[in-house]
Image (cartoon, rainbow, N blue to C red):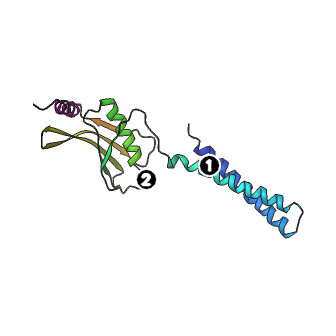
Amino acid sequence: MNFSGLFTTAGNILGIVTILCAVATLVSWLTKQPWRFRAFGVTAFLVVLTSGVWTLAILPSIVRQRIPGAEKFSVVFDRGGSRAVIAVAATISLEALEKTLRQAAIDTGSSGRVISDRTFVLQARTIVHPRPGVSQIIPVGTLERQFGSSNTEPRIRIDREALARAGAIAAQGKQPVK
């Protein structure tokens, strides 16, 4: 459930009430009213309360969403442009790869990217070792996301053959060497 809008509205209302209370406190101090110390306490409490509610309003943008089932990945290439590359385990399953691509898109995709065509491409790859001393990079999937429209679903393409080949090579590497 997204409470960001609720906290923003509540924070704005509390901000207005805080300003009105601060004006009343200032008037009470200028006219030396006997309740001026209570007014100061109420104003100080409202300042703390308002700042806390505004913090809760921006918290969802600070704490990223976690997708259950996503596996660990490493960011291999990301310069803040229209393309990023992640590395995943060679033994990752098809479902886990899709969830990991979605998680990586959340973690790496931001509105501050310098993108000319408004398309962000995230590529997943794995590294396998078919024989000792040889490393092979195998691209296993991509995610394309359009910036500017938040309700568009990202397009995910997974290369099933490459994923199966990477899994087979990784399984061969786990056998003991004779």
Question: In the rendering, at what x and y percent does residue 128 appear?
Answer: 19, 39
Quadrant of image for the C terminus: top left
In the rendering, at what x and y percent does residue 25 appear? 80, 62
In the image, taking residue 153 as reference, residue 29 lies left or right, namely: right
Give the dominant element type of the magenta stretch: helix, strand or loop. Answer: helix
Magenta segment: 161-173
Q: Residue at x 58, y 45 (%)?
A: 4
Can residue 73 be seen in this snapshot?
yes
- Residue reaching furthest to the right: 34
Q: Quadrant of the N terminus?
A: top right
Q: Residues within 10 Å of mark 1 (few under 14, many from 20)?
A: some
Residue 90 vertical position relative to residue 123 in the rendered view, above or below: above
Which residue carries the number 2 mark?
Answer: 111
Q: Quick one: which residue is furthest to the left in this view?
A: 178
- Inspect this view and state whether residue 154 appears: no
Under mark 2, the amino acid is: Ser
Residue 43 located within the stretch drawn in magenta: no
Tell me the tag on residue 8. Answer: 1
Query: Could you say which is closer to the camera, residue 9 or residue 36?
Result: 36
Q: Nearer the viewer, residue 87 or 81?
A: 87
Residue 59 horizontal side relative to residue 53, left or right: left
> In which quadrant of the rendered view does residue 33 lie?
bottom right
The image shows residue 159 at horizontal and vertical percentages of: 24, 34
Give the residue type that dot 1 points to.
Answer: Thr
Name the residue rendered at 76%, 61% in the picture.
Answer: 22
Viewer-side residue, 119 vs 42: 42
